[in-house]
Amino acid sequence: MHFLMTAFGSYGDVHPIAGLGGALCRRGHRVTIVANPHFRPVIESVGAELLPIGTLQEYEEMAGYEDLWHPVRGPMLVMQLGVVKYLREVYALIESNFCPGETVLVAHPLDMASRIYQEKHAAPLATVVLAPLMLRSFYQTPKFSQMFTASWVPRWLRRFQFWLGDKLVIDPLLGPPINKLRQELGLLPPVQGIFRDWYLSPQLVLGLFPEWFAPTQPDWPQQVALAGFPLWDQPDSAGLPAEVEEFLRGGESPIVFTPGSAMAHGQSFFRAAVEACQLLDRRGILLTKYTEQLPAALPTDVRHFGFVPFSQLLSRAAAVVHHGGVGSCGQGLAAGLPQLLMPMAYDQPDNAARLKRLGVAESLAPKKFHGPGVARALDRLLTDDSVHQRCHHWAKQCSSAAALSAACEMLERLQQTRA
């Protein structure tokens, strides 16, 4: 069986797809992943083949946009430079690599080309949803930036806000290029309500998160199936780098700080991290590959490293402070750690709200994310026995092996039912 997968975005988007692709390879399948060549080492390390889309320079340019982290301008930028820019190129790659009767398409939510190909050729397609934000509901409505979606907000008002977003932003931006390509392929009439009605596969929507993190809602599509957190982050069988291991052994468990792998404008985040560590008299680890974000000089008990797999690091930490990406949330839950989040955009506010409901986290808005505020929040989390009990409880519910196995079985069945 051949699985043709797409992985758009940062490491938080690519790692789950790569982990799933690796699991499929181990089950004897051939896996091809469409992604930016920046991720070639990640993809090839799992035994999959890379189909490159875009350039290394384009990835770095995208990460350099400060608007990328704005709650409104960020998603629009992603749709313009991700969905629209590569729509036809991705479709051409699918056409060239799809084998009828053998290939299953496995699409990132921002991959509209696979959905169009499925429409045209009745191909087997699974949409992979990494975070529950991508599944609309008017029961337990996800938390969106700049929208009123709390349970006390009348359902009609929540519906109106989504209708307005579709009418004024989503459909005008995505509709013309999608419908132009569809029309050229003989697919009529034009689609409307792209995020409301169309973009998800009508065959399988594979949620890579567990039921207890995001309970199934009555108005989700019937084809939604949840597998659990895959928790794959490019683990290295050789263990942690020597300098990381040396620091970990040199004192008490540190607090780990990261604003996300693609964040290149986190100066204030890291200043607050260092100040909080000093106020608490705690050791800290700062994770980023963009060293220009860091203070010029770090205290001896605070160290900077580039990429370190959370799956290996967090079991040695006291707490984790991050942006609220779903991959980081899952790794923190699996490690049984208290989490402090600074959500900015995308799925981050919704993930933060879900962790708070589980009783394992607090969140601070970017404007309130300063040294004293971070220190106070961490002190509450680290000294509250009930937080640690809930962290331990949810950690026992996390199983990467079970999630990957369940996801693979669902994808295999998708092809078998069409054979």
Image: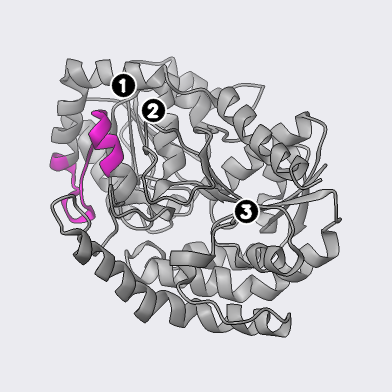
Mark 2 / mark 3, whichever is N-terminal: 3
Identified by mark 3, the residue type is Ala
Q: Is residue 85 above or below residue 29?
A: below
Return the mark for residue 333.
2
Q: Amino acid at mark 1?
A: Cys
Local crowd at mark 1 within 10 Å, few (<14), some, or many (≥20)? many
Q: In which image quadrant can residue 58 be found? A: bottom right
- Indicate how the structure is coloured in the image: one colour
Classify mark 2: residues with Cα within 10 Å, few (<14), some (14-19) or many (20+).
many
Position of 195 compared to 379: left or right? right
Residue drawn at x 44%, y 33% as measured from the top left: 210
User: Of residues 148 and 7, which is closer to you in this image?
Assistant: 148
Q: Which residues are magenta?
A: 353-373
Return the disc, 2 or 1, that comes first in the chain's sequence: 2
Pick the residue in front: 148 or 224. 224
* Magenta run includes residue 356: yes
Write down the quadrant of residue 251 in the picture: top left
Q: Quadrant of the N terminus?
A: top right
Horizontal placement of 356 versus 208: left or right? left
Q: Which mark is residue 7?
A: 3
Disc 3 to disc 1, C-alpha distance? 30 Å
Q: Secondary structure at mark 1?
A: helix
Do the residues bearing badges 2 and 1 touch, measured as CB atoms within 8 Å? yes
Which residue has dot 1 on it?
Answer: 391
Identify which residue, 399 or 105, lies in the foreground. 105
Using the image, determine if residue 86 lies above or below residue 105: below
| Image spot of residue 148 (x, y percent) | 20, 60
